[in-house]
Every structure is written in C-alpha cells, then in structure tokens.
Image (cartoon, grey):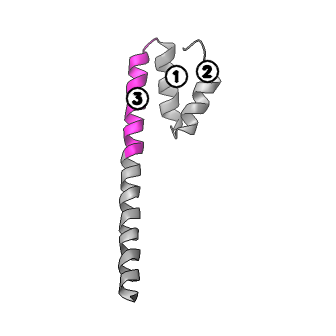
Amino acid sequence: MRKNQSKEAIIQNLKDAGCDSETIENFMADLQKGKEANGLKRLAVHRKNLLDSLHREQKCIDCLDYLIYQMKEAEK
C-alpha cells in the first residue's frame, strides 16, 4: 500500500469514484498481496465503464438539444 495514503482514504476514493463493494474488496486485496498492476487493471476497467456511460449520456443530451433546436426553429 502507498505510504502516503491510508487504507481508509483509498477506500473512500474508490467509493467516491463509484466502485462497488466487490471492486473495492478485490482492489484492496490486490494491494495487500503486492499485485498493484492487477489492481490498476481493475481501475482501468472501471474507468472505461464510467467513460462509456458518460458517452451514452452525452448522446442522450445531444438528442434532446437537437429536438429543442428543431422545435425552436419551427416556431420562427
């Protein structure tokens, strides 16, 4: 485990990042076993999932923005 980060701080950061309890437990186990590279892979997967979700949500926002634009143009 990192010298400058407590176990509690790491767990809180993972919770704040939206990690579920299984991901947190597995990540912490990786750190304790000295398998930091494996833990980093887990975080990369979680990050990718978050980014994919963000892109899906952005597409929905773009669709709404376009509909709003079309409706406003039709009022002119």
* Mark 1 or 2: the one toward you: 2
40 in the magenta segment: yes
Q: Which residue is mark 3?
A: 42
How far apart, in angstroms, are the residues tagged by discs 2 and 3? 17 Å
Locate the N terminus and report the quarter of the image it occupies.
top right
Q: Secondary structure at mark 3?
A: helix
Q: Nearer the viewer, residue 59 or 72?
A: 72
Residue 63 at what x, y percent from top left?
Answer: 35, 67
* Residue 14 image position (x, y, % from top left): 54, 33
43 in the magenta segment: yes
Q: Which residue is mark 2?
A: 7
Residue stretch in magenta: 34-51
Residue placed most toward the observer, 32 or 47: 47
Whether residues under marks 1 and 3 lie with C-beta atoms below 8 angstroms apart, the answer is no
| Residue 58 lies in quadrant | bottom left
Q: Residues within 10 Å of mark 2 (few under 14, many from 20)?
A: some
Give residue 52's position: percent from left, percent from top. Answer: 36, 47
Q: Earlier in the sequence, mark 1 or mark 3?
A: 1
| 21 shown above or below 60 | above
Q: Which residue is mark 1?
A: 28
Q: Residue at x 52, y 22 (%)?
A: 28
The relative height of residue 45 versus residue 67 in the rendered view (above or below) is: above
- The rendered magenta stretch, by its main secondary structure, is classed as helix
Q: Quadrant of the C terminus?
A: bottom left
Q: Nearer the viewer, residue 60 or 31?
A: 60
* Contact flag, marks 1 and 2 (Cβ < 8 Å): yes
